[in-house]
Amino acid sequence: MATRDTTDSPRRRIVEAAVELLESGGPDAVSTRAVAAAAGMQPPAIYRLFGDKEGLLEAVAEHGYAQFLESKRALLDPEPKDAVEDLRRGWDTVVEFGISRPELFAVMNRATSRGANLAHRAGLEILHGRVRRLAAGGWLRVDEDLAAQIIQATGRGAVITWHSTPPERRNPALLTILREAMIAAITRTEPMVPATETGPAAAARALRAALPDKAEVLSDAEQHLLREWLTRLAADGGAPRRG
């Protein structure tokens, strides 16, 4: 990931030159010759450091993810006063990044390198943390996994729709409407008071929301199995299955 680079290192200069060319001229502008010239280096340096153009684009994606995570972490509040508003801010951050940096966003979504995958998972951890806080506060009206999928789908859909719409027909109201539709789909208008919700489903949701803070006492296999059980209980209240 970008943390491998030191200030003004050859690798960093090449990656930043590639990002600038990508965002000003699209993928076709990112030729090894053009990138080398923009970085003030010779083309063989790119092959030595990245292997080929695809390797360079993977490094560009990792660089983009590093910037993306930095922007998300800058707004991260581990104990927000309003978990629903915190979700709004997080959604807006993702969509704004995708809308303002479309070429980089597209390269990031195509990336398959280990560094990009690790950064992607780090971003998902931030998302799932927000969802867990909503669940713990009694705000969720759907399962945590489904909530996370809806948040991702609406965010990515908003970016794709925005860029596929001719500029003269783009309406910022679309983004607000999609965000609020997402909020309405996954959250309650008022939080469920834990004491008023009883039964296996309620207990399962409460325990699953608290599990990340207690997971160190369990092995990876035990955590996986427990989450699977809790997910089933939270979804149907532990109703007996008919075979």
Image (tube, rainbow, N blue to C red):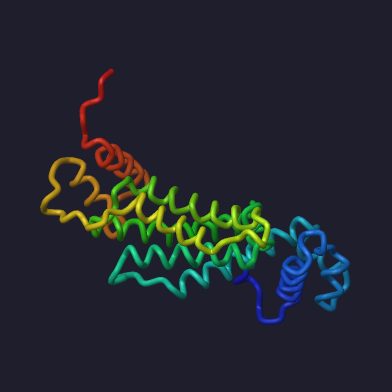
In the picture, which quadrant includes the N terminus? bottom right
| 35 versus 106 height, above or below | below
* Quarter residue 39 falls in: bottom right
In the picture, which quadrant includes the C terminus? top left
Percent across and percent down for residue 54 are 76, 55
| 79 versus 149 height, above or below | below
Q: Across the whole image, how many numbered discs are drawn on residues? A: 0
Res. 217 in view: no
Is residue 59 toward the left or the right of residue 123 in the image? right
Percent across and percent down for residue 146 are 39, 45
Residue drawn at x 28%, y 39% is: 235
Q: Nearer the viewer, residue 39 or 72?
A: 72
In the picture as drawn, the residue positioned furthest to the bottom comes out as 7
Residue drawn at x 41%, y 53% is: 182
Residue drawn at x 57%, y 55% is: 117
Is residue 5 toward the left or the right of residue 76 in the image? right
Q: Nearer the viewer, residue 61 or 182?
A: 182
Percent across and percent down for residue 192 are 19, 54
Residue drawn at x 33%, y 45% is: 143
Res. 36 in view: yes
In the picture as drawn, the residue positioned furthest to the top comes out as 243
In the picture as drawn, the residue positioned furthest to the front comes out as 168
Q: Nearer the viewer, residue 235 or 42?
A: 235
Is residue 212 toward the left or the right of residue 112 in the image? left
| 212 versus 227 height, above or below | below
